[in-house]
Amino acid sequence: MSDAFRVFVGSLPEVCPSDARRMVLTADAGGRCEVFTWDAASRSVRQVTDRPEGTVHHAVDADAYVWWFDEDADGRGRWWFEPFDGGWRLPGLPGAPAGSPRGLAVTADGTVAAALAPRHGGTSLLVGRRGRTPREVLRTAGQARLGGITPEGDLLALATVSDGDASVVVVAASGRVLATLPGPDGLGDGSDDHEAPDAREDHEEPDARTGTGGRFWCRGFSPRPGRRELLLVHELRDGYELATWTAHRGLVTHSWCRFDTEITASWYPDTDEVLVRQERHGRSLLHRVSLPDRTRRVVPTPAGTLLDAAARPGGGLHYLWTDTAHPPVLRSTDEIALPAPGPLPHVPGHHTELWTPTPHGRVHTLLSLPEEAANGDGPGAGRIADGAAPPTVFLVHGGPADHDRDAYDATVHSLVASGYAVARVNYRGSTGYGPRWRRAFGTDVGHAQVDDLAAVRADLVRRGLADDRATALWGVSWGAYLVLLALGARPRTWQAGIAVKPVADWVSAHRLTTPALRALDVRWFGGTPEEVPDRYSRSSPLTFAAQVRAPLLLVGAERDVKCPPEQIRSYAAALTAAGVAHEELWLDTGHDGYDGAAHVAVLRRSLTFLHSRLPPPVADAPSRPPAPSGGPRSR
């Protein structure tokens, strides 16, 4: 398996602004993510980086200098650059403090803007010249990222999050804050396409407390010189709309251009049009929007998921397409050649979907059945060959502000090829189903999601698609937390569980995790463990550890700062004290990583564990090893 395993990152190559044939991308290098150049004119590839733990953050500027972030095991480091064709390499911002990368932008004249999160917390916004010592123009106490820079380098946007509140700050290169979006009354006059006074408050993650919505997602300045127009996505109570900001007009919302589910947006490079990518019910749609003309049309793409999409000069389009049955493929509507993905594996199985009615709304599930068991086509594929349902593994996505997509997943591939059915459930809190579903988190953290998983399981059993005696849970990060909570809160429902880098003890995790995640905990629970201890206890897997009955595989990471190893060990100790059967696997990694060896180790151990607990009823003969991995999921 390890010889064929390739790490995959779901993003398009970065294109040189002055020569679209020159691109920089992250690709596989012996099971690690590393930075490469691609010259479409000569069809040549060059590997730029070669680091033991891999490299993922990269960029290319108008002078065709390749940028990459050289980080240590804790995710902190500095930016470097070198010529596209190779040669000397220099510090991009010499003298800048080491930190975690929060965005980089380089203008055509070599002005560099970078956001870094130093070790002591907060975010520093730096501005300077390529290869020279920068100056700090703004510092925030909370988490933030660079939202964009104008082509002239005179305006920057910083998207900030602090204690659950969010804002987009527009700042001049001198450091003078020009606006904080939106205004004090939410949206100025709140009308469509009207001038608003200087905008004030805002930002990024949806929150049930925001009412009709004061949150704006920053999508960058127009790349056209002289425009100085900032693009935003405005979240409403029941949808999303585009918005723009300029110093002259202030904040303008475009209420005629609304979407019912989550979107991201970016400018076309040579027009005033906007490319909108919509995530809807596990799949993607593209829209081409003209703000001046108030027009919007769907851009035809194959059914499935677009992991990334970008408009190119002249109306061209590059996108990264996949569905469950097909690994990701780079596609282009212009004549610029994109790097070929290499041989793609055969993806076995029958892939369909179903909706489960619940008192809280319909829950969407992507279902993959092994070829030996599947019978029938389409959404109504509710029959199992020979009447024998295969054991079913529920892959529980992380986030929770994320969703499972109709997209290739190496774990799905491996499980289906091994004779298991796979259910991917987009429970309450998932994206892709609109703000109301994303906010329907429930009053007890985690329990609404466990209820949804149990409801889908019961539905699959009722339809004859799952065996009531053979269902397992497998999750990573937040998904792993739900695995542990489900095994303890509903001990007679599940027959096995795999939890990779979970939150296992909320109180300990809160004290040991990052400041940003502590702030998120406080928002979810309404206070700290000292202030609302019962809420933390009610949602902590540790509380239910002694009730677990299903065998469990626990996977922890020694250098994990998001889901620290100490709180996993305390949970494991509680299992041991209660006599609960479990296994442990420890990785010498952090929470996230770019090394495929760790993914392979977890995949192999997990499949071995499942085979000993839920042996498949069909011949156990994986067709071919999985190709690109979907990468680690965030908490």
Image (cartoon, grey):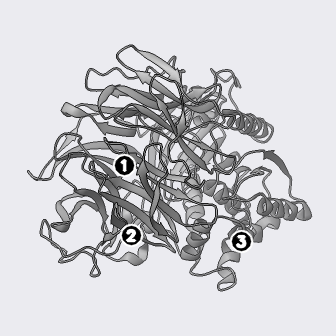
Q: Quadrant of the N terminus?
A: top right
Query: Which numbered dot is residue 167?
Result: 2
Residue type at the position of mark 1: Glu
The residue lying at 83 percent from left, 64 percent from top is: 570
- Of the numbered discs 2 and 3, the one sitting upstream in the chain is 2
Q: Residues within 10 Å of mark 2 (few under 14, many from 20)?
A: many
Instruction: Determine crowd level at label 3: few under 14, some 14-19, many 20+ residues with C-alpha closer than 10 A.
Output: some
Residue 511, disc: 3
Q: Residues within 10 Å of mark 1 (few under 14, many from 20)?
A: many
Q: Nearer the viewer, residue 333 or 196?
A: 196
* Mark 3, secondary structure of its residue: helix
Left or right, residue 626 beside residue 159: right
Q: Report the residue that reaches farthest toward the top.
A: 42
Residue 144, how many percent across, how many down? 47, 62
Please state which amino acid type lies under the numbered disc 3: Arg
Mark nearest the camera among 3 and 1 is: 3
